[in-house]
């Protein structure tokens, strides 16, 4: 565990979820994983979220200050694999929207803010106009998605969640002007492709000081606003992946932590890449306790300058 001279505040916002795999539910959501990581890194961590009594995993968040807007249900997700068709992500019975904390809360002045929705439950404008100071980051994936049309499974297809809706594209044009208030934004190549706007990354680069685009085993690209010469790519550590769950959340969380500690963008990205390479060698969140080595061995991660998207 990292030993800090002073406790820094990390605030994460977004739904914790119940992820269904063959009828078995496990805790999930970017906000869940990021909170676990910040807590492991010995930060004073808070999570603003919404879940119901069906979320039986609060013991995993014992070191985290929870601000929960009690809901009837916890947001559930399930992947389904229709025959001769791409994988679909299904959602139903979303929990309440995740609202900004009240004005007198000390976590309104965090050292790190990470907005990590799963399906449009955060109002970006409201959050950014009420949070003061610190490094502000967001995972774009959950801003790009919302529940869409109901899904009708085939006769031979087993879906466990009730009244499932297909996760669909969400328009963020009205929120683009608020993105300039962020310091860092994270998305994957897959996120950009699913959204369908081939100019999305260019729009982000025009508005956000640092745009991080991850691409699994290909590594990540870090684009610095206003200067291609300052942009760069990072590779990954050689690994034997077991479970990719939480890799992107680990990258974002460790990057924000390292950057908030005053490290360079290059060092933050290398530490983040190393850490995400570690967590995927374990099932679920089991690898989080192994990420500390990323802060000592990050120089094993290759780095190169870039001028274009060369994924």
Image (spheres, rainbow, N blue to C red):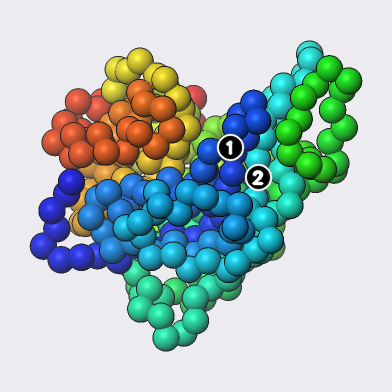
Q: Examine the rendered structure and indicate whether residue 7 appears above or below residue 306.
A: below
Q: Examine the rendered structure and indicate whether residue 306 appears above or below residue 9.
A: above
- Point out residue 56 in the picture as x, y percentages from the top left corner: 52, 50
Say whether residue 306 is visible.
Answer: no
Is 87 situated left or right of 30 in this image? right
> Dot 2, crowdedness within 10 Å: few (<14), some or many (≥20)?
many
- Point out residue 289 in the picture as x, y percentages from the top left corner: 27, 38
Quadrant of the rendered structure where residue 281 is?
top left
Residue at (26, 59) in percent of width and height: 43
The span from disc 2 to disc 1 (Cα, nearest Å) is 9 Å
Q: Earlier in the sequence, mark 2 or mark 1?
A: 1
Quadrant of the rendered structure where residue 159 is?
top right
Name the residue carrying label 2.
Answer: 76
Nearer mark to the viewer, of 2 and 1: 1
Residue at (35, 34) in percent of width and height: 286
Residue at (88, 20) in percent of width and height: 155
Q: Examine the rendered structure and indicate whether residue 284 appears above or below residue 146.
A: above
What SS does tag 2 mark? strand
């Amino acid at each position: 565990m990292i030993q800090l001279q002073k406790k820094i505040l990390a605030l994460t916002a977004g739904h914790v979820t119940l992820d269904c795999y063959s009828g078995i539910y496990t805790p999930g959501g970017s906000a869940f994983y990021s909170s676990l990581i910040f807590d492991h890194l010995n930060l004073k961590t808070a999570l603003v979220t919404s879940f119901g009594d069906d979320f039986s995993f609060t013991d995993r968040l014992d070191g985290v200050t929870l601000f929960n807007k009690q809901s009837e249900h916890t947001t559930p997700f399930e992947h389904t694999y229709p025959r001769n068709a791409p994988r679909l992500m299904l959602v139903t019975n979303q929990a309440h929207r995740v609202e900004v904390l009240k004005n007198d809360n000390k976590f309104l002045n965090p050292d790190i803010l990470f907005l990590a929705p799963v399906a449009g439950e955060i109002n970006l404008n409201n959050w950014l106009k009420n949070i003061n100071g610190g490094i502000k980051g967001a995972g774009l994936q959950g801003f790009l998605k919302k529940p869409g049309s109901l899904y009708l499974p085939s006769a031979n297809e087993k879906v466990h969640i009730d009244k499932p809706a297909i996760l669909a594209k969400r328009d963020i044009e009205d929120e683009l002007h608020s993105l300039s208030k962020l310091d860092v934004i994270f998305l994957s190549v897959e996120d950009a492709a699913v959204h369908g706007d081939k100019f999305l990354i260019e729009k982000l680069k025009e508005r956000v000081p640092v745009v991080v685009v991850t691409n699994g085993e290909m590594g990540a690209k870090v684009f610095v606003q206003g200067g291609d010469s300052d942009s760069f790519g990072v590779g990954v550590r050689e690994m034997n992946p077991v479970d990719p769950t939480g890799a992107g959340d680990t990258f974002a969380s460790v990057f924000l932590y390292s950057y908030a500690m005053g490290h360079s963008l290059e060092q933050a990205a290398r530490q983040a890449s190393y850490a995400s390479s570690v967590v995927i060698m374990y099932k679920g969140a089991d690898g989080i306790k192994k990420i500390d080595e990323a802060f000592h061995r990050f120089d094993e991660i290759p780095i190169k300058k870039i001028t274009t998207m060369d994924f």
